Image: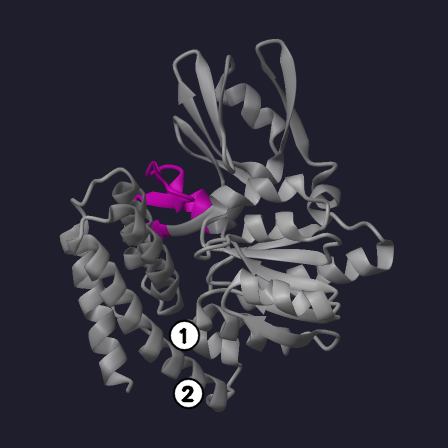
Amino acid sequence: MEHPNLDYIKEISGGNEEFEKKFLNIIQTEFPKEKDEYMENLESQNLDESAKIVHKIKHKLGILGLQEGYRLAIKYEEDLKYGDTKLQGQFHEVLKTVEQFVLKIA
Amino acid sequence: MRSIIVDDEASARAIVKELCKTIPEMEVRAEFPNAVEALKFLKDNQVDLIFLDIHMPKLTGIDFIETLQNPPKIVLTTSDKDFAIEAYEYPFIVDYLVKPISPERFQKCAFKLNSASNGGASNLLKEEDAEDDLYINIDRRLIKLKFSDILLIEAKGDYIEIQTLGKRYRVHSTLKKIKDKLPESRFLQIHRSFIINFTQIIDIQDNSVLIEKSVIPISRSNRPELMQRLNLL
């Protein structure tokens, strides 16, 4: 199981700690909102909207260095557009990992 | 260069803004979480460049472009390469950046922007690829494909299927024939049925590569050459 990391953020910041802190605050605010929005749409069987939010979450998985999660999100986003939720369990595991990471860096 | 950033993700705006700091001539005037607010700003303010996300609620990036009367240069930012092909329809789109944007790729974009400003040619997507193309015969029509748009080629019996950004073409030919026409600097056969554009690899895992949304197998004998071609850290 892969784990989130801050390599990309550090690469972007070039050592600017103020940016890193600010950016992590953004992730801490944005990710839970997107996750809740995704879950609500999924529960309502609004799969097209769920796919759109997975698209956004996918970017965050890339930012946090989750290559496998990113690959999974690409497939899951496409599947959702066709009403297929078979990757849901795996995707939720990735979300849980990110959630724990976000809480840890808080 | 006066610029604005339009993206509904605050994290994406923050990254572009930070990357802009590495380009001395770049000045970020404002950032907007949606296209409607950006349009309001543009009514009273002139800019030279817009970093524009494609996937936004209400008004998408493409819808936004359609509403602009006198568009400045635009750099698309997207997590989805499917939309990249649409960039060729607009002469003022200078580049498209796939998220998460790497600093190296952003520098390349800045170089393109700089060249566009100096040379007056606004569409460097076209300019860059002008000498890198291949014609394929589809129903007696010769269709031009840019090498940079080709993602992969798959052998299918007496045919090959060429997957580009946004389209798939079926051509009566062989992998061997097309391999001879493709530049080695960009393409590599990684399996008896697949040639890939290795500059488009998203990642490599075990015995497969991910290119856009396709997972392509790597044969054991081709793996060492692929690894040799990659710029590994």
- Front residue (pair A36, B136): A36
**Is residue B19 rendered to the left or right of residue A45?**
right
State which region is magenta. Answer: B204-227
Q: Is residue B20 above or below residue B194?
A: below
Q: Quadrant of residue B135?
A: top right
Q: Secondary structure at mark 2?
A: helix
Q: Is residue B168 above or below residue A49?
A: above
User: Is residue B185 something that shows in the picture?
Assistant: no
- Residue B81, label in figure: none
- At a point 73% along the width and 52% down the height, the residue shown is B69
Dot 1 amino acid type: Asp
Q: Residues within 10 Å of mark 1 (few under 14, many from 20)?
A: few
Dot 2 amino acid type: Lys
Q: Residue furthest top?
A: B140
Q: Is residue A13 above or below residue B225?
A: below
The residue tagged 2 is: A21
The residue tagged 1 is: A7
Q: Quadrant of residue B180?
A: top right
Q: Is residue B140 magenta?
A: no
> Which chain hosts label 2?
A
Q: Is residue B224 magenta?
A: yes
- At a point 46% along the width and 43% down the height, the residue shown is B225
